[in-house]
Image: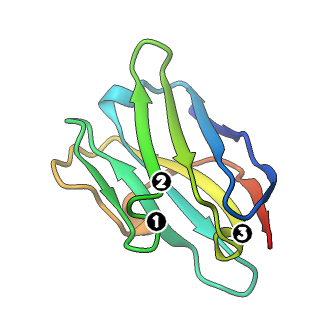
Amino acid sequence: QVQVVESGGGLVQAGGPLRLSCSASGLTFSNYATAWFRQAPGKEREFVAGISQSGTTNYADSVKGRFTMTRDNVKNMVYLQMNSLKPEDTAVYYCAATRTYTFAVKISRNEYNYWGQGTQVTVSS
């Protein structure tokens, strides 16, 4: 049984950093395309960053240059390093994975079939 778990969320001041972690049981991240999505109150869940099985990464325009997604194949972990956080980054952040091989990062939530429960990130101004 596959289980995906996010951690690392919290309250941070604008301009500060935060690192989210994603762990999984029942799957090996190096064999899965993985992504971070976020959902703010009253808004649709949106793509933030993704990494394909080959290691290709892609980012939403709103986070380019501030967020970095990495994968540790030894620890079987995925991370999202968030720097220069803004109040508009406040949302529940979700880690998602799909076994379907992809060279280019998929940005649609419909492409991912394994999801964590989410972790809250709140950025105060």
Q: Which mark is residue 63?
A: 1
Distance between mark 1 and mark 3 Cα atoms: 12 Å
Crowding near pointer 1: few (<14 within 10 Å), some, many (20+)?
some
Question: Which residue is painted at 47% across and 57% down in the image?
Answer: 66
> In the image as oriented, which residue stretches furthest toward the top?
74
**Which is more toward the observer, 18 or 92?**
18
The answer to which of marks 1 and 3 sits earlier in the sequence is: 1
Query: What residue did someone put label 2 on?
Result: 67
Question: Under tag 3, what secondary structure?
Answer: loop
Amino acid type assigned to the residue bearing label 2 in the image: Phe
Distance between mark 1 and mark 2 Cα atoms: 6 Å
Crowding near pointer 3: few (<14 within 10 Å), some, many (20+)?
many
> In the image as oriented, which residue stretches furthest toward the front?
15
Question: Which residue is painted at 38% across and 69% down in the image?
Answer: 108
In this image, 124 relative to 42: left or right?
right
Contact flag, marks 1 and 2 (Cβ < 8 Å) = yes
How far across and how far down the image is residue 36, in percent?
50, 54
Query: What residue did someone put label 3 on?
Result: 90
- Quadrant in the picture for the N terminus: top right
Amino acid type assigned to the residue bearing label 3 in the image: Thr
Distance between mark 2 and mark 3 Cα atoms: 14 Å
How far across and how far down the image is residue 82, in percent?
57, 51
Question: Which residue is painted at 59% across and 30% down in the image?
Answer: 23
How far across and how far down the image is residue 78, in percent?
49, 34
Q: Is residue 15 above or below residue 2?
A: below
**Which is more toward the observer, 70 or 105?**
70
**Which is more toward the observer, 64 or 22?**
64
